[in-house]
Image (cartoon, helix red, strand yellow):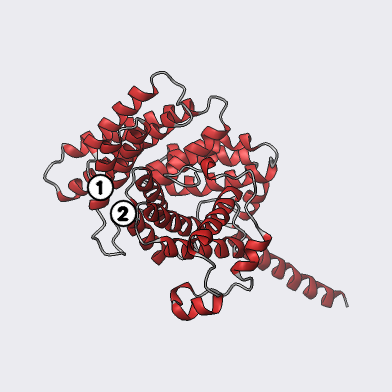
């Protein structure tokens, strides 16, 4: 009996060893951490580890650990979002090192919202980023004639231009009270256009600055140049600005009265994503503004507003100001055009507007009438809901 127990104990020991070995293998991760480490380390420890990895130029590993630090901060300190401030700054640096200026800017701006000094902190970090990019650009230009260096020069110029634009946006928003904000914007945009004259994003930011200065002709010129860089490219070309950038472009085009160009931009956006409430709204609004200039687009505008309202309802979109404006515009266009076509007839006439919503447009309007405190003069007649 003792022998049987001994054999049984030996088998159990071997199983435990195999299980322990298997579990140990499963714990290890690509970034050198383990599941157990992930569970036990505090967000502060993860931030420290990510910072060390970044200083060691292990950028990809630093990104992984920094993102876990951010997630952990939000989990551990749900009522103190400012605790994640250092990690947001670190992620901004990491994404900049990876060449993703957009995500870098996004994290810097999030950090700015949490910072007690606001935009000043973002400016400080963007200045560091610009210094790094300027130095990299000088080193690359010394390798003139090397094909790889030429490609890197173009990319570095783009990154520097977009970073300068990010600084400009800070001066136009968080630091707009600064007495030198205007001159700083001009200086930053002058450098941005010099280093990256063929960047749609740079030209759009230049247009935004000129609009704020009420220099509409200059803004129109910048927007025209921006669009000409990519408007004739195939839809899948990598040089076409991203979706969010073109949404901003459509708004700027409307602000300077370039409605046909705005319609062109929005139509392309909706072809790419017909589930974007904002794109549908801008499509409707641009057509309405064209109608105000004697274009025959009132009916199209109402169709787009109706489609926008249906999508808004179906996806539980959260922008009450936009919804109220859409309802108000539908009501206004109904008064101009008369009662809308029945849903069934509309679908037969134009399959493009086929909709699976269970609630008919008329029912929506009956339930959601425009509120009295929402007036047309509360809405920017150039850019719609801001």
Instruction: Give me the disc on residue 60.
Output: none
Q: Residue at x 60, y 65 (%)?
A: 314
Assess disc 1: are there few (<14), some (14-19) or many (≥20) residues with their C-alpha within 10 Å of its C-alpha.
some
Residue 58 visible within the image: no
Q: Eyeballing the image, is 332 above or below 91?
A: below
Residue lying furthest left: 145
Task: For mark 2, give the secondary structure.
Answer: helix
In the displayed orientation, state which residue is furthest to the right.
1
Q: Which of 273 and 218 is in front in this view?
A: 218
* N-term-proximal mark, 1 vs 2: 1
Q: Name the residue under label 2.
A: 261
Q: Are marks 1 and 2 in contact (CB under 8 Å)?
A: yes
**Percent coordinates x, y for residue 119 in the rendering:** 48, 28
Q: Is residue 29 above or below residue 198?
A: below
Give the labeled residue for mark 1.
224
**Residue 347 seen:** yes
Left or right of residue 197: residue 85: right
Q: Residue at 44% of width from left, 54% of height from top?
A: 285
Q: Which of 99 and 261 is in front in this view?
A: 261
């Amino acid at each position: 009996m003792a022998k049987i127990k001994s054999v049984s104990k030996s088998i159990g020991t071997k199983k435990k060893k195999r299980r322990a070995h298997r579990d140990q293998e499963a714990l290890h991760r690509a970034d050198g951490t383990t599941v157990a480490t992930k569970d036990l380390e505090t967000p502060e420890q993860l931030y420290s580890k990510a910072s060390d990895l970044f200083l060691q130029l292990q950028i990809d590993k630093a990104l992984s650990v920094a993102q876990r630090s951010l997630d952990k901060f939000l989990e551990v300190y749900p009522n103190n979002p400012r605790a994640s401030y250092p990690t947001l700054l670190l992620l901004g640096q990491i994404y900049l090192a990876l060449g993703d200026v957009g995500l870098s800017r996004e994290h810097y701006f999030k950090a700015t919202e949490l910072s007690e000094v606001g935009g000043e902190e973002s400016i400080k970090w963007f200045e560091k980023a610009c210094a790094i990019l300027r130095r990299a650009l000088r080193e690359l230009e010394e390798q003139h004639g090397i094909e790889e260096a030429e490609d890197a020069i173009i990319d570095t110029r783009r990154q520097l231009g977009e970073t300068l634009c990010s600084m400009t946006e800070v001066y136009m928003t968080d630091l707009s009270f600064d007495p030198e904000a205007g001159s700083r914007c001009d200086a930053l945009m002058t450098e941005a256009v010099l280093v990256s004259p063929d960047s749609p994003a740079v030209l759009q930011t230049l247009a935004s600055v000129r609009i704020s200065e009420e220099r509409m002709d200059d803004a129109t010129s910048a927007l025209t140049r921006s669009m000409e860089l990519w408007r004739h490219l195939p839809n899948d070309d990598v040089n076409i600005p991203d979706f969010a950038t073109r949404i901003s472009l459509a708004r700027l085009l409307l602000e300077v009265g370039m409605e046909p160009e705005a319609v062109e931009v929005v139509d392309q956006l909706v072809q790419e994503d017909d589930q974007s409430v904002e794109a549908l709204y801008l499509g409707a609004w641009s057509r309405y503004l064209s109608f105000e200039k004697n274009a025959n687009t009132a009916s199209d505008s109402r169709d787009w507003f109706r489609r926008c309202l249906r999508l808004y309802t179906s996806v539980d979109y959260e922008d009450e100001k936009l919804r109220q404006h859409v309802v108000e515009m539908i009501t206004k266009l109904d008064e101009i055009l008369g009662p809308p076509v029945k849903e069934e007839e509309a679908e037969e006439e134009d399959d493009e507007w086929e909709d699976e919503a269970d609630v008919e447009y008329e029912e929506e309007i009956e339930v959601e009438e425009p509120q009295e405190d929402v007036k047309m003069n509360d809405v920017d007649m150039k850019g719609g809901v801001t």
